[in-house]
Image (cartoon, rainbow, N blue to C red):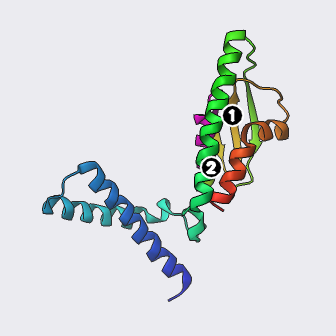
Amino acid sequence: MNSRRVWAILRFVLTTLFLYFVWVLFTSDLGLFSLLFGLAASLLTASLTYHIFLPEHEANLRFFIPHLWALLRFLFLMVLSLYQSSFHVVKAIITGNTNPRIVHFRTHLRSDLARTVLADAITFTPGTMTLDLNDDHLTVHWLLCTTTHTKAAGEAVKTKLEHALGRTWL
């Protein structure tokens, strides 16, 4: 069996398991009919969507299974960044020193999952909101903008989080 076929089967199985887990979680019904219906629905949905759920070009488990310690480090940095930004935003609003701008920059992350998590982490951090993620290009609204230079803005907004995510997912 060639590697493409094995990856397709693995993608189908992982998609089915994820959908079935979500079914059981949301229905919270462990009756036989509910479990069998959820399995059938998961199999049908996975057969139609597994190629979208896990793209073929991400044919490596490291693209979507994180390293545990790197993930914990990222979550710690995310919480730290959340608190630091909150205090900076509150101080800027009280003093009236805001400088809202739209900035554009690129990310060096290769995984679609890692790019999406970075965009969500930027949005989750007070004072920044990701407006668009297109391949490796991010468009961000930055409330406390210090520069509109692409590289400098990217370094200021994403550096720590991107570095931590780069170690979490390839």
Q: Are marks 2 and 1 in contact (CB under 8 Å)?
A: no
- Residue 96 to residue 119: above or below: above
Query: Residue 35 at x, y = what percent?
Result: 20, 62
Q: Nearer the viewer, mark 2 or mark 1?
A: 2
Residue 121 highlighted magenta (yes or no): yes
| Mark sitting earlier along the chain (2/1) | 2
Q: Main secondary structure of the magenta part?
A: helix
Confirm whether residue 111 shows in the render. no
Write the residue at 78% across / 40% down. 154
- Work out how far the residue at label 2 is from the one at label 1, CA to CA, in angstroms: 20 Å
Image disc number at residue 43: none
Q: Which residue is mark 1?
A: 140
The number of callouts visible is: 2
Residue 118 highlighted magenta (yes or no): yes
Could you classify mark 1 by the number of other residues whose Cα lies within 10 Å: few (under 14), some (14-19), or many (20 or more)? many
Question: Is 19 placed left or right of 147 in the picture?
Answer: left
- Residue 48 to residue 102: above or below: below
Question: Is 84 placed left or right of 48 in the picture?
Answer: right
Write the residue at 61% across / 45% down. 76
The answer to which of 132 and 126 lies nearer the viewer is 126
Q: Which residue is mark 2?
A: 74
Query: Residue 19 at x, y = what percent?
Result: 35, 59
- Give the magenta-colored segment's residue range: 116-130
